[in-house]
Image (tube, grey):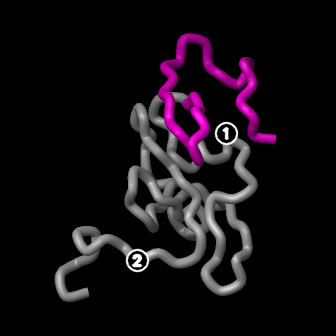
Amino acid sequence: MFAQRPEARAPGAAQVEVFVDGRSVQVPEGASAAAAVLLAGLPAIRSTPVKGSPRLPYCMMGVCFDCLAEIDGVANRQSCMVTVAPGMRIVPQQGARRARPEMVGEGA
């Protein structure tokens, strides 16, 4: 459903190559990492910690947290709030992940 079709690209729009679960995906410059996930056609970007239910980006505005993914080695990133960059690596997140210490406030 979200496969990128040639007619979906704006003529002359700059494209950025990112890697979603190891797959090269061309996305419009300025798009979110969540958009790249949808364009890649993955069945899920994360699974829930309790039941392992598959999830894909849903609200696309940072409210629902269904788009959590590991982006460039950092877990628990809201992919809808991250703008793609050339060479970005987006990996599905399975269950709960601890944030890296530098990503959490002191004393947390």
Q: In the picture provided, is 39 more to the left or to the right than 104?
A: right
Q: Amino acid at mark 1?
A: Leu
Q: What's the residue at 40%, 50% (across, down)?
A: 72
Mark 2 vs 1, N-terminal side: 1
Q: Which residue does the numbered mark 1 point to in the structure image?
A: 39
Q: How many marks?
A: 2
Vertically, is 108 above or below 61? below
Q: Which residues are magenta?
A: 1-27
Q: Position of residue 100 (x, y in %)?
A: 31, 71
Q: Residue furthest top?
A: 12
Instruction: Tell whether position 11 is magenta.
Output: yes
Q: What's the residue at 58%, 76% (across, down)?
A: 95
Q: In the picture provided, is 29 more to the left or to the right than 50?
A: left
Residue 84 image-quadrant placement: top left
Dot 1, crowdedness within 10 Å: few (<14), some or many (≥20)?
some
Vertically, is 93 above or below 48? above
Q: Residue furthest front?
A: 22
> In front: 49, or 7?
49
Q: Secondary structure at mark 1?
A: helix
Q: Which residue does the numbered mark 2 point to in the structure image?
A: 98
Q: Position of residue 1 (x, y in %)?
A: 82, 41
Vertically, is 31 above or below 75? above
Q: Position of residue 94 (x, y in %)?
A: 59, 69
Dot 2, crowdedness within 10 Å: few (<14), some or many (≥20)?
few
The numbered disc on residue 67 is: none
Instruction: Tell whether position 33 is magenta.
Output: no
> Where does the C terminus fall, quadrant-wise?
bottom left
Q: Secondary structure at mark 2?
A: loop
Q: Amino acid at mark 2?
A: Arg
> In front: 92, or 10?
92
